[in-house]
Image (cartoon, helix red, strand yellow):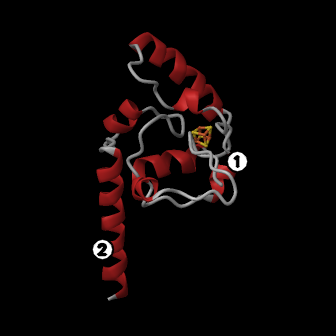
Amino acid sequence: MGNSPGIERKEGETMSIAAANTYVDWQTQAWMTDGLCAGRSDLFFAPFAERPEARVRRESKARGLCEACASTVECRAYARDNRELGFWGAESESERATAGFAPTTPIIGRRQVAARRAAAALAEAG
Ligand code: SF4
């Protein structure tokens, strides 16, 4: 499967209904296979009750990987389009929010994105 930040599923692994609802809009993107973040979820997503100083250190390390990654542009665009949580494409959640792409709550946000895309596809088809 894809190697986007924090999503490490094995070939053939199935998702629960709850997980499928959470990832209702998930599709593996070609650029994800080139990501340098594979296996480094600890750098790309905040642990519970992370202190601000620890966040700065963690995101600095994540940014270093992103800046060396061939997928930065595609990754950042994907995260903005999908209102992702976490650090994607050399951009933190707060940087994404400042750019106008604030994350929404995980399930509701993904459902809203999926609903907008479905409506656009229907409008295009009709
Ligand atoms: S740009 Fe960063 S978050 Fe995106 S795939 Fe590359 S290493 Fe991972």
Q: Residues within 10 Å of mark 2 (few under 14, many from 20)?
A: few
Residue tagged 1: 34
The residue labelled by disc 2 is 119
* Viewer-nearest residue: 62 or 114: 114
Q: Is residue 65 above or below residue 30?
A: above
Residue 58 against residue 5 in the figure, above or below: above
Furthest residue in direction front, as rendered: 16
Q: Quadrant of the N terminus?
A: bottom right
Tag count: 2
Q: Residue furthest top?
A: 53
Answer yes or no: disc 1 within 8 Å of ligand 1: yes
Residue positioned 62% across, 26% down in the render: 64
Instruction: Give the residue at x 36% y 31%.
Output: 94
Q: Secondary structure at mark 1?
A: helix
Q: Label 2 sits on what residue type? A: Ala
Kindly identify the amino acid type of the residue bearing the numbered disc 1: Asp
Q: Is residue 93 left or right of residue 13?
A: left
CA gap, disc 1 and disc 2: 31 Å
Q: Residue at x 59, y 22 (%)?
A: 61
Looking at the image, is 29 positioned above or below residue 87?
below
